[in-house]
Image (cartoon, rainbow, N blue to C red):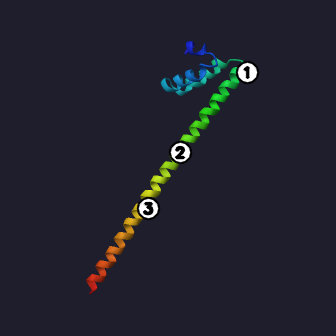
């Protein structure tokens, strides 16, 4: 972690990704605080990266939600179609039985 703090602005995104992938989530916050220190420019860079991550996270959730909705809508449609087919077959059987 100490070596990652020495990263320059072009390397910080890769360092954050490494921490996100191989460390516990709280380490990313610690890294951000220590890397930026009191440097306003570095604080802005971290803020930008956090916003990008949030936007990416939100878009992935939206995509998953839409995919799940489409899949469930299709499943419901198939069940309803099966129900209608089954109901019409039962009516036909009743009519034949009554004859």
Residue 40: x %, y % from top left:
73, 21
Residue 50 location in percent, x, y? 63, 30
Residue 74 is drawn in which quadrant? Answer: bottom left
Whole-number angstrom distance, CA of label 3 to CA of label 2: 21 Å
* Farthest-out residue, bottom: 99
Report whether 65 appears left or right of 51.
left
* In this picture, residue 81 sits left or right of residue 33: left
Q: CA distance from mark 1 to mark 2?
A: 34 Å
- In primary-sequence order, the first of circles 1 and 2 is 1
Q: Which residue is nearer to you in this view: 48 or 35? A: 48
* For marks 1 and 3 on the same chain, the one whose residue lies earlier in the sequence: 1
Q: What element does badge 1 sit on? A: helix
Point out the residue furthest to the right here. 40
| The N terminus: image quadrant | top right
Q: Nearer the viewer, residue 55 or 35?
A: 55
Q: Residues within 10 Å of mark 3 (few under 14, many from 20)?
A: few
Q: Is residue 77 above or below residue 87?
A: above
In this figure, which residue is indicated by the disc labeled 2?
A: 63
Please give the residue where the numbered disc 1 appears in the rendered image: 40
């Amino acid at each position: 972690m100490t070596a990652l703090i020495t990263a320059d602005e072009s390397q910080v995104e890769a360092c954050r990704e490494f921490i996100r992938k191989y460390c516990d989530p709280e380490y990313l916050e610690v890294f951000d605080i220590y890397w930026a220190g009191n440097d306003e420019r570095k604080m802005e860079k971290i803020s930008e990266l956090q916003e990008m991550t949030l936007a990416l996270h939100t878009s992935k959730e939206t995509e998953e939600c839409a995919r799940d909705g489409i899949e469930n809508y299709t499943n419901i449609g198939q069940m309803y179609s099966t129900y209608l087919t089954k109901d019409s077959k039962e009516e036909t059987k009743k009519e034949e039985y009554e004859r």
